[in-house]
Image: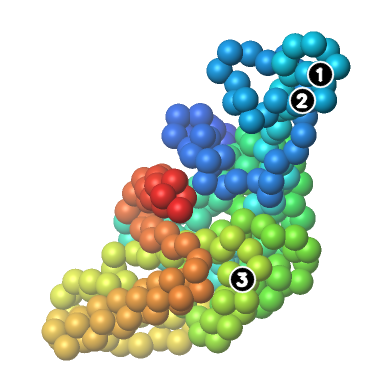
């Protein structure tokens, strides 16, 4: 039984996601994620403005006046949300944690899928796959996913993205749209990432917090690695430390972006500063523009 506070949090996220779908993303989602082809729907009488190339000459000859064939897009798309739920996702020094950012984006994408009658599923991964919800349709299913995304308590603190990628490559029999949401504090997943990008429409969503690239000079600080539990005393007043920290964070982001580009996967860079919905909308617009010119 969910507490009143948790139910209130779910309602708030649901309303925000639905509003964004209706106001911003509903049409964009459909235009950038196309179906697998077209299917015949009906033959109807020709109307002014119809493309004459669609005329069904056999029916036209039989009926004595023009008829056209009508086709519709075959969608039956599958959207899979792959969420990194490792301990580093609890970090956030701005308006939200990385985990909260991922939850909002995932809820929004789930409602976009449901609004377009697509299936949506979930994989939660730490240093192993912790939860799998097979793709299904329907608002009730989307609400179940939202609850799982918000309130799943990870059993393990580490990160093993390869385990999550290998898992969905096994269970997804057909091509799917896959949003891989992580801060990518991991190594050894690159080969699996490239394999997934060949099989699926893969979008890497990179979570970051401003403090990861820019430590303030506040003297000696005890820091603890959320995933390993190791502690370290650092001197943030040392310019060499701050520069090395900034360089390492930027190098990690650049490496993941280069991997995505080389694998022909898409990329979204989001922050805990509250601008993540704008980043998602910008991705849709850029992709729509790119597809329009392809």
| Front one among 19 and 48 | 48
Instruction: Say if residue 235 shows up in the picture.
Output: no
Q: Label 1 crowding class (10 Å Cα cut-off): few <14, some 14-19, many 20+?
A: few
What is the x, y in percent for residue 87? 52, 71
Q: Spot the residue most to the right.
A: 62
Mark 1 vs 3, N-terminal side? 1
Instruction: Determine the CA span between mark 3 and mark 2.
Output: 41 Å
Residue at label 2?
57
Foreground of the two, 91 or 218? 91
Residue 257 drawn at (x, y percent): 40, 72
Using the numbered discs, state the Cα–Cα distance from disc 1 to disc 3 in whole angstroms.
47 Å
Of the numbered discs 3 and 2, the one sitting upstream in the chain is 2
Crowd band around label 2 with a 10 angstrom C-alpha radius: few (<14), some (14–19), many (20+)? some
- Asked if disc 2 and disc 1 are in contact, CB closer than 8 Å, the reply is yes
Q: Residues within 10 Å of mark 3 (few under 14, many from 20)?
A: few
**Label pair 3/2, CB-CB below 8 angstroms:** no
Q: Quadrant of residue 171?
A: bottom right
| Residue name at image x 46 percent, y 76 percent | 262
Instruction: List the residue tagged with mark 1.
Output: 61
- Helix, strand or loop at label 1? It is helix
Residue 34, given in percent of the width and then of the height, sits at: 60, 46
Instruction: Quickly name the residue at label 3.
Output: 198
Q: Nearer the viewer, mark 1 or mark 3?
A: 1
The residue lying at 16 percent from left, 75 percent from top is 217
Left or right position of 244 against 253: left
Please tell me whether residue 98 is drawn above or below residue 288 in the rendered image.
below
At mark 2, the secondary structure is helix
Residue 166: give its label.
none
Residue toward you, 82 or 195: 195
């Amino acid at each position: 039984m969910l507490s009143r506070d948790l139910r209130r949090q779910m309602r708030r996220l649901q309303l925000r996601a639905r509003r964004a779908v209706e106001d911003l993303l509903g049409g964009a989602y459909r235009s950038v994620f196309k179906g697998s082809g077209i299917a015949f729907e009906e033959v109807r009488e020709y109307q002014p403005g119809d493309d004459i190339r669609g005329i069904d000459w056999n029916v036209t000859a039989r009926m004595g006046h023009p008829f056209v064939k009508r086709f519709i897009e075959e969608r039956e798309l599958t959207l899979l949300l792959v969420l990194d739920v490792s301990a580093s996702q609890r970090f956030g020094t701005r308006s939200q944690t990385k985990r909260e950012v991922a939850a909002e984006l995932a809820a929004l994408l789930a409602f976009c899928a449901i609004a377009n009658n697509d299936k949506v599923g979930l994989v939660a991964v730490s240093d192993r796959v912790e939860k799998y919800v097979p793709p299904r349709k329907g608002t009730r299913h989307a609400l179940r996913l939202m609850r799982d995304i918000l309130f799943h308590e990870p059993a393990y603190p580490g990160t093993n993205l390869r385990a999550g990628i290998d898992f969905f490559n096994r269970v997804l029999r057909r091509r799917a749209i896959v949003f891989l949401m992580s801060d990518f504090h991991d190594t050894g997943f690159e080969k699996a990432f490239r394999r997934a990008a060949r099989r699926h429409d893969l979008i890497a969503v990179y979570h970051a917090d401003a403090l990861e690239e820019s430590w303030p000079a506040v003297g000696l600080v005890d820091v603890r690695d959320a995933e390993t539990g190791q502690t370290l005393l650092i001197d943030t007043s040392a310019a060499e430390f701050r520069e090395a920290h900034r360089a390492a964070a930027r190098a990690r982001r650049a490496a993941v972006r280069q991997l995505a580009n080389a694998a022909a996967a898409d990329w979204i860079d989001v922050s805990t500063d509250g601008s993540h919905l704008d980043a998602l909308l910008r991705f849709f617009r850029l992709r729509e523009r790119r597809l329009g010119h392809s």
